[in-house]
Amino acid sequence: MSRSDFFLGIDLGSSSVKTSIFDRKSGKSIDSFTYPDSEMEIISEQDGWAEQDPNYWWECISHTFDHLRESNDFKSIRAIGISYQMHGLVVVDKKYNPLHNAIIWCDSRAVETGLKAEAEMNDDIFETKTLNSPGNFTASKLKWLQDNKQDIYDKIHKIMLPGDFIVYKLTNNLTTTPMGLSEGIMWDFQSGTISEDILDYYNIKDKLIPEVVDSIGDQGTVSDDIIERFGFSKGLRITYRAGDQPNNAFSLNVLEPGEIAATAGTSAVIYSVTDKNITDLNNRINTFLHCLNSKTRKRNGLLLCINGSGIAYSWIKSMLKEKSYEEMDIKSEKINSPEGIKFYPFGNGSERLFGNKKIDSHLLGFDFNKHSNNHIIRSVLEGISFSLCYSIELLRDFGVNVETVKVGKANLFLSKVFRESFINSANVKLQMFDTNGAEGAARGAALGSGYYEDATEAFGSLKIISEEIPNGQNTYLDRYKDWKNFLNKLN
């Protein structure tokens, strides 16, 4: 088989790193590896803070490379694609060493910074240019460093998103993308350039922003030391870079206006593609560039995020001392309902759905005489699915026709109870595909390298493996309405 057939996809999450080798001819992954086995540490020195060591990300990626090269010839890899956790902030000095832990997506320290900007800046900027208020996103996190850690801020040579840092580790070059800047609220959708309004208000010098390159296409050549260390072919290039949620949509062939993807990993997300500039001044829905956006074809992504999803299920697993997620799923199926227990998965920082409020997680309605682990597990699965349904409702309020949602065969969507609860409470058809973020990044690398003529060809091999529709029973919908009634009191 020709060496030109293989592409490497890296998916940098906040829980783990997954790397896959994708065969263009068969349209399938031939090998993959996830590291670490346990979830990556999230450092929380103060309430609402969430940090990770960016050098540890690179250690994890290197570990996946080392594992995969034991049984695969890395000289057959023709290009690399990268998916990464969105909205984080990495700051480096002139020697490109991190000056601070990465302030990641679920960190809440910059909420007040964003609220102040929202109160003082002209609403027209948010409505027509950035399409979002600065909120708790990357630009606000950088401003927080400026205001609270001036000694570190003064040493900053460049700022990066998590994916930009990984590109640097592979190429020794610092670059970013319009998509990355849009998710950091540093992009002007009107002019198609870096947002001078945000940079001026926050007193951020534009020299801190790396060179801007497109998400699909040449991101840089892998450095000689990395080539030698891992046995790649000389001249190997990175040709795709995207945040995890646009990449998840891309992986599922969600590319055209009206198409919708969902994921339920560490966080739970509804992502809808549009060709319009849509602004929600309540900041519940965020508009960012989609990876397929170009000067001739506008593609934005509407994103609704619930911070606590898989992390909530993981927490319950630990607290209940359950052995595996598979056993938890089986226990959830042994009963027909949580018998009155309600779970609210909002314990992972401030939530955009509620105006960046930190409303915390809640587990309500225990009866010591009748409830068991089974009931708690089921209540968590239903509560997370209900939060996704709540997001679907918001999209419909904005005029988005939500009929079909595409998902990967992974994470909470592996649970029958979770799928049934989501499908019936949101009244949607669910299409499942056997793909993941790492495979999607590898497809993106093949597309960005020109091995596919267009996205249609790139996804020609992607097939639906299952399709589920609402069962016509209202029990889930009734529980969702009851769940939402208390949520309105929390909010």
Image (tube, rainbow, N blue to C red):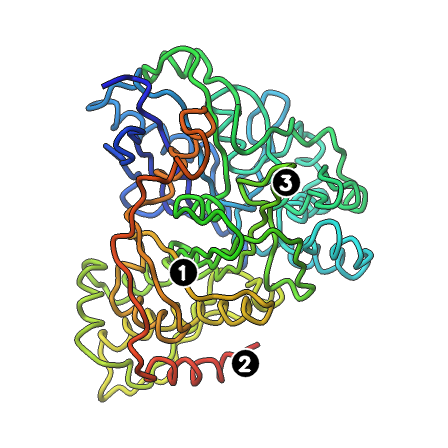
Identify whether 150 is placed above or below 491: above
Which residue does the image show at 77% across and 45% down from the upper left?
Answer: 202
Marks 3/2: CA–CA distance = 33 Å
- The disc, 1 or 2, on the residue closer to the chain's N-terminal end is 1
Locate residue 95: give its quadrant: top right
Which residue does the image show at 34% across and 45% down from the upper left?
Answer: 436
Asked whether 335 or 45 is in front, the reply is 335
Q: Which residue is mark 3?
A: 181
Residue 405's disc is: 1
Residue 330's disc is: none
Q: Which residue is mark 2?
A: 488
Disc 2 crowd, CA 10 A, few/some/many (<14, 14-19, 20+): few
Give percent across and percent down for residue 198.
76, 45
Of circles 1 and 3, the one toward us is 1
Q: Is residue 248 left or right of residue 257?
A: left
| Callout 3 amino acid | Leu
